[in-house]
Amino acid sequence: MVRGSSADNVVPLRGGLPASVAHAAAVDPLGDPRIVVRGSGPLSGRVHVPGAKNSVLKLMAASILCDGATRLGNVPAIADVSIMGELLEAIGVTMTWSGADALQLDNTGRLTPVAPYELVERIRASINVLGPLLTRCGEVRLSMPGGDDFGARPIDMHVSGLEQMGATFRFEHGYVEARADRLHGADISFEFPSVGATENLMTAAVFADGVTTIRNAAREPEIIDLCEFLVSMGARIEGIGTGTLQITGVERWSLRPVEHDTVTDRIQAATYLASCAVAGGELDLVGARGEHMQMLLHRFGDMGLDLEQYDGGVRVAAPDRLRSIDVATLPYPGIATDYKPLIITMLSVADGVGIVTENLYPGRFRYVEELQRLGADVSTSGHHAVVRGVERLSGAPVRAHDIRAGAAMVVAGLAARGETMISGVHHIDRGYDDIVGRLAAVGAHIERH
Ligand code: UD1
């Protein structure tokens, strides 16, 4: 029996979420909204790029490590933040919105190390509570994670790394149970630079006995953000931003709560770049971090986009017609798999033929059928998609199957003649902070019903 797992110990959900986020989190499939996009262009103006989903969720999970009030800024108003907040509330950390983009997480240290199915199945990043709970509570019971619908997403690297640090695991009835009286440092080599496994081992190592080395660690900007957050709390991490992270365990009392601004979302930034690319015009993406998107910006340049990076943003001007390129997804600093639906959408109206190779998730092409409904000429085979550009797409009803595929449908709608009606909008709400308002403000014909 896991300590404190009785229903009596579960802290009830407290209020304080902005209405838009609370609404987006409470998805009623029958009342699911629609986004309607009409062929648009040219776009013009400034778009403020919000904080990164893939960072803030990890920062929130890591707040479990530290008693007191953690304050996060530049937080996107997205449904996944709200779901992670509910999960933390169930564990014993209270979340309150303290501004439009600011959160406070209050941790009294009375934690219930159980992550229930109802919450975990809704969000893949719930796996990130594993490391912090295990190292703080000595045990954890976590439902196997769900999240986006793109093929099997195992957690064997998380498990094997924590085992090397002294944890023992049991898998039963859809739950993972882990125990470790005190984790110890270990020298761990990853076969593949998994983002989630790097984050879990890093947070678990913060209180472990001795030094933990993670080789072939992930190097994404969101990992760096988490490292900087942990270091400002008092953790000892070396090698930040490299493939070898070295974490020296510290005592629990030496951590103190901090204020931290979430890194800007490179995937949302790419979504607005892609929008401008297909609709035409010029945009100024305020807050975009060009240095986190170097490879992508380089390839977008090859497609004909005129890009200018400045301190605090990226400006883009679209060409008359995009040029096709070949692209392969890779771990950072390569082209992220999350950009791929956007790239395929851009290629579907580009001049020429482009081949896109997926190296991370073989099954991640489901949205291609939706693009075909809009008249895109795309064929897939195994890890590859061949995209033959057409002059213009043609609007139709389509479905968002996951967050990024949903964003790609919005971009496709901008490039299509007539009306594109997108269902499955709750997927888009999981990762996009008011995509409709941001695009409408720069001239796109887009509404939410
Ligand atoms: C994170 C991002 C996701 C992004 C992905 C890759 C979040 C919430 N999600 O997901 O948007 O697409 O990084 O950049 O931050 N794998 C294993 N065993 C493991 C762990 C992973 O086989 O123990 C495999 C996965 O199935 C997948 C690949 O490794 O094929 C990438 O996974 P990982 O880097 O861990 O991605 P996530 O952290 O799940």
Image (cartoon, helix red, strand yellow):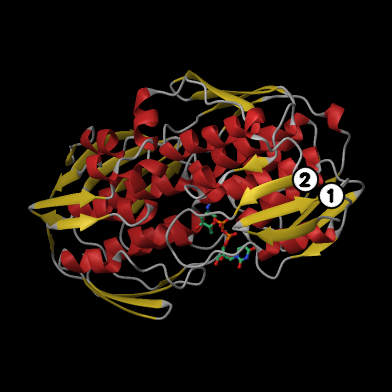
What type is the residue that disc 1 sits on? Ala
Placement of 378 over or under 434, stated as above or below: below
Q: Cβ–Cβ below 8 Å for labels 1 and 2?
A: yes
* Residue 113 locus on image (x, y percent): 70, 39
Please state if 229 lies on the left or on the right of 125 as rendered.
right
Q: Nearer the viewer, residue 70 or 273?
A: 70
* Residue 424 locus on image (x, y percent): 28, 50
| Dot 1: element | loop
Q: Quadrant of residue 354?
A: bottom left
Q: Which residue is mark 2?
A: 139
Crowding at label 1, few (<14), some or many (≥20) Cα neighbours within 10 Å?
many
- Residue at 83%, 61% (x, y): give it: 164
| Dot 2: element | strand
Q: CA gap, disc 1 to disc 2?
A: 6 Å
Label annotation for residue 128: none
* Residue 305 locus on image (x, y percent): 32, 55
- Residue at 54%, 24% (x, y): give it: 103
What type is the residue that disc 2 sits on? Glu
Pointer 2 residue Cβ closer than 8 Å to ligand 1: no
Q: Which residue is mark 1?
A: 180
The quadrant in which the C terminus is found is top left
Ligand 1: give its quadrant: bottom right
Q: Nearer the viewer, residue 243 or 395?
A: 395
First reached walking from the N terminus: tag 1 or tag 2: 2
